[in-house]
Image (cartoon, coloured by chain):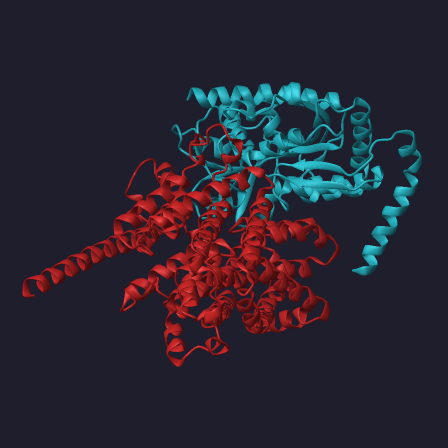
Chain colours: A cyan, B red
Amino acid sequence: MTIALTRRAALACAVAFAAVPAVAQDTWPTGPVHVFVGFPAGSSPDILARIITDPLSQRLGQPVVIENRPGAGGVIGVQQMLVSAGDGHTFGTTINGPLTTAQRLMDDTGFDVAEDIAPVTLIATSPLVLAVSSDSDFTDVDSFVAAAGAEPEALTFGSVGQGSGAHLTAELFAAEAGVSMLHIPFTSYAEVTTSIMGGEIDSGFMAPSAALPHVEAGSMRMLGITSAEPFAQAPDVPVLAGQAGLPDDFRAELWNAFIAPADTDPAVIERLNTEINEILADPAVQEQLLAIGWQAAPGSPADLEERIATDTAMWGAVIDRVEAQ
Amino acid sequence: MTTWEGLLFGLGFALQPEVLVYCLLGVVLGTFVGVLPGIGAMAAISLLLPITFYITPEAALIMLAGVYYGAQYGGAVASILLRLPGTPQSAVTTLDGYPMARQGRAGVALFTAMASSFAGSVFGIVVLVLLAGWLSRAATAFGAADYAAMMFLGLVAASTIGASRPAKGFAMVTLGLLLGCVGTDVNSGVQRFTFGQTELLDGINLVALAMGLFGVAEVISNVRDPDRQGVAERLGLRSLMPRREDLRRMGWPILRGSAMGSFFGALPGTGSTLSSFLSYSMERRVARQPERFGNGAIEGVAGPESANNSAAITAFAPTLTLGIPGDPIMALMLGALVIHGVQPGPMMLEARPEMFWGLVASFGIGNLLLLILNLPLIGIWVAMLRIPFHLMYPAILVFLCLGVYSVRGLSFDIVAVAMIGLAGYLLTLARFSPALLLLGFVLGPLIETNLRRAFLISRGDPMVFFERPIAAGFVLASIALLLLSLWQAWRRRAGAGDEVSSG
């Protein structure tokens, strides 16, 4: 343990020294950098943030401190980032919800995505898998959709909450497949998993890393995945697009992004974008991300801005449909 | 691997010097965060998480688990000495632990808490080792209807604890249920009683509520009433040893509390706070003289303290065998494993036997360390009561605020704890029981969410509560208990009437 620590410290020092010329040219950062995360320590978004901020701290030559401000589906993290903003050293990582659907689902998030938030870069994306109990009769998505279409709300699906990615993805799936399913909201994948395995609910769109251990143990089956390509963590699961009446461009992904308060110096955003993109290009980092179910998705600030716009429109249409029911 | 082979293998692993050091570190830290009001295992484990990157996942888990169950030991200390629960789980221990201290029996109360904690943990470990597989199946066998029916039984069984008058008790449970409604409704997504405050979307913070009602309210009471300051003068060393009578009274409550805690601990989402409340209400119900409760009944300390400790152990059953965390702290510990690239799940037991058996063995070692550590500490804790009031209580308020802030890092929660504290003080002045409010708050959301979920899944058919055997059993038990209470009340009234007519 002591050896590993020393090696790390030595590495950190080496990187810090190597970074000296860059820091000399550009005075930023002059102190510790704070990254707000809207989920508790140890959660998937938190671990993802730590995978990025660990090397980021070495590259910036300053400590990068994770500030966990959990609550309201990640919205509190973004709010608290904005409250603490102003010193040029405050940033945040967030899941897609607070930037795309929260404005629709909450009375008042206290911020305007376009006005208050400067996109830095997308970090990673994650598809969802359609999971059922291995005791069920469903072997593929065709048999599932056929059973779901027998009568309205013939099948139930669980999610991690009203308006969550898991909920909206299932609604999108049902609408595209021309069926209607009954939504049973839970608060965590752990609850959804127990309920599926106990035979209480029929299905659920789940994060691959939440479903995989139970698939390996033989108690769950994955019928399809919502990404455009098969996912490296679960290569055998067929993509849903083009199957069972779903359109060829059917796609639903969750993502995590690095964001800044709107008044952040553009040069700082540029620097952060470059550093994080280089971190994401490291195969070791990609592997760490994949192990917790995320695929590295580097890009420019403009790419993230576009992603926010497309997803806000796409999920907005799904929310319209759910509210009209 | 058979159970014995597994245990021996685990002991071999957990007794390695390095692992042993982390275990000791965990339980010592756990004891201290447990003692400090407001600062709990959650805060300590969050802070330790980054450190665990540098040690093996097994050692990390053993250390974090040590903090988790160690905090259950420490929680009772402040409950007994100051009527300030160190953790929400030990809030119910204030009901009889503090009166014992007032009677000059603080040492006996602390000894009882430690001995019951140890006995409860040992019971939990035995259950975990022998029944881990069965417990994890029970976790998936319980559906929404079963949870709703079980929580209803809990509400019926516990709704009279610590109340001077039934009507006042009923009012407090109802207020607790209403406070539990605050936040986003799981079933509909509607935001209830949030008044536009994002901080209230996930409900009122349990730590803020428990610490406000018990902690801040108690500090205000002491400022107002200098008479209550200092229990220490009445404490001699002779008071540390329990009498034979005390030992006799502890046995059954510990056994019942442990069994109850082991059961509730293994069910995801029910938790150790509930098991200590239910154990208390059970002891009060089975007691020959229920009026002793609230006035320093040793059973009221022994039962709940054994229950929350056995629950803290069996809570690892679904976590380790299914990878399904039963509470946020368990989720945090699994997160620590994920950081190390260990995927928690049903395969972990086979893939990494040292993880399961090493941890189970470390429970045994850790609890032994806790007992050895805590028995001599009793004297020190009691001596702490000699710290002058004007130094101790401001310090307690600082720790309370730190603890509440550490849960979410929001200053909103500090304002909340102050306001709840003021309200809690007014309630105690009017002789309302804050324990019942807390019980309603914990049970309310569980009952509501599961009841509505059960109806959603059954498409509105109430027969689901009678067709599922588990649910039906709990419904019948609730009805029986209600009838029993009514009959007892009728008997008492009839009896009182006889006395009046004969006198």
Q: Foreground: B147 or B99?
A: B99
Q: Residue furthest left?
A: B501
- The quarter of the rendered structure image containing the C terminus of chain A is top left
User: On screen, B181 above or below B159?
Assistant: above
Residue in the picture at 83% in, 35% down: A30
| Residue at the front extreme of this rendering | B226
Closest to the observer, B147 or A246: B147
Q: Quadrant of the N terminus of chain A?
A: bottom right
Q: State whether residue A74 is above or below residue B279.
A: above
Name the residue nearer the viewer: A151 or A114.
A114
Q: Residue at 49% across / 66% down in the picture? A: B124
User: Percent x, y for residue B8?
Assistant: 62, 74
* Residue A248 drawn at (x, y percent): 61, 23
Residue B434, percent from left and from top: 39, 50
So how many labels did they put on this image? 0
Q: Is residue A124 visible?
A: no
At a point 52% along the width and 61% down the height, the residue shown is B72
Image quadrant of residue B138? bottom left
Q: Is residue B23 left or right of residue B496?
A: right
Residue A156, relative to residue B439: is it above or below?
above
Q: Image check: A88 left or right of B384?
A: right
Q: Give coordinates of residue A317: x percent, y percent.
A: 53, 19
Extreme residue in the right direction: A21
The residue at the point 76 percent across, 32 percent down is A89
Q: Judge from the rendering whether residue B81 lies leftward or rightward of residue B172; answer left or right.
A: right
- Quarter of the image for residue B383 reads bottom right
Quarter of the view holding residue B384: bottom right
Residue B244 can be seen in this image: yes
In-front residue for pair A323/B33:
B33
